[in-house]
Amino acid sequence: MSKKLQDLIRPEIKDMAAYYVPESAGLVKLDAMENPFSWPEEMKQEWLGLLSKAEPNRYPDPAAKELVEGLRDCFDIDSSLGVILGNGSDELIQLIVMAMKNGSCVMAPMPSFVMYQHIARSLGVKFVGVPLSEDFSLDMPAMLEAINAHNPAVIFLAYPNNPTANLFDDDDVESIIDTTDGIVVIDEAYQPFAMKTYMAKAQQFENVLIMRTVSKLGLAGLRLGFLVGHNSLTSQLEKIRLPYNINVFTQLTANFAFKHIDVLNAQAVLICEQREALLKKLSTFAGVLVFPSKANFILFSLLADSAERVFNELKDAGILIKKMGAVQGLPTECLRVTVGSHEENSLFLGAFASIYHS
Ligand SMILES: *Cc1c(COP(=O)(O)O)cnc(C)c1O
């Protein structure tokens, strides 16, 4: 690119690395917290029948009314609260940060979901990361001090947290909500596996937004997230949502899936059972430190082996997990594995047993 063109781009964007998604064709995919299960054949056929009636020549319903109703039913959203739809919750993170005044600052514990920082940087917004305690709980003195020092417009709390898989202490979360003058976004991406939520308390806190996604529940391909909060706040954010951000096929498929929410919920229960089995088996390896999980993934650290080597050899054996690399606040040599089906987990464990040296 010519110097002239280069100069048009904001320097912080030139300094950024693109969000990296590894090639996964042909591999057992345990890297991205997807639901491994497909739909019963009958349900699939019913869905295909509906799809044949979709009208791709028409714009989607800009308000996605039927979808919002379905969400309210499925996820117990009080009728007094506002709902904003996003093309994945990633888009909602962007929408929230975009709406803040110039000079605002965004805060999150570290390590946490990388998109908070990535999006803040891409929008030229200052990001402050506050290291978690060693046991991955919120470091409250540090959080409260950072809130005092930086007066963040937005604080993101992933509940459960990614990549550490734990739920933060409720007293800590509420103390942050009470202390800050900013908005607290409680990112409940893993709610289907944690069974804990702030949804019922959304009324109580005017400065809280509850963020959810259907990605981890089993609809990652749809790209659908939603944000719930007091109308006074959501009505402002709704103004900058792009009018047709939820496409025809996503609306149709999500409407259909919400009518069969029992199927997805039953799959989440199976995934939780598989998680417990996988936690137990991984913990039997000497020198593997396995962290507890309330999500559909497990973080573990190799005390005497190289995560890089194990990751690469697993990949050569056809199994893709996530190598955490040098993430601030994590022990060294950490890997993250998504909980898959019984068969996938067995393949992973079998390969791991032959690759790993304690
Ligand atoms: C996966 C994930 C998301 C992203 O969800 P999408 O709706 O697929 O964009 C958001 N927050 C956390 C903590 C996640 O792990």
Image: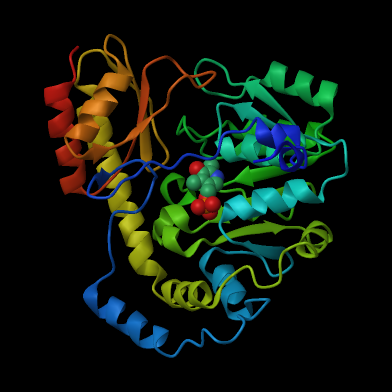
Q: In the picture provided, is 189 more to the left or to the right than 342?
A: right
Question: Where's residue 130, x and y in %?
Answer: 66, 22
| Residue 107 visible from this viewpoint | yes
Which quarter of the image is occupied by the N terminus? top right
Question: Where's residue 238, x and y in %?
Answer: 76, 64
Question: Where's residue 313, x and y in %?
Answer: 21, 27
82 vs 205, nearest the viewer: 82
Q: In the picture provided, is 124 more to the left or to the right than 298?
A: right
Residue at figure coordinates x 87%, y 35% from the top left: 103
Residue found farthest to the right: 102
Picture quadrant of residue 114: top right
205 vs 317, nearest the viewer: 317
| Residue 174 visible from this viewpoint | no
Which quarter of the image is occupied by the C terminus? top left
Residue at figure coordinates x 51%, y 39% from the top left: 160
Q: Check the image and report above or below for 26 versus 345.
A: below
Q: Check the image and report above or below for 245 versus 321.
A: below
Residue at figure coordinates x 67%, y 34% from the top left: 14
Question: Where's residue 223, x and y in %?
Answer: 51, 61
Residue at figure coordinates x 55%, y 26% from the top left: 111
172 vs 271, nearest the viewer: 271
Residue found farthest to the front: 2
315 vs 278, nearest the viewer: 315
Picture quadrant of residue 312: top left
Q: How is the structure coloured here?
A: rainbow
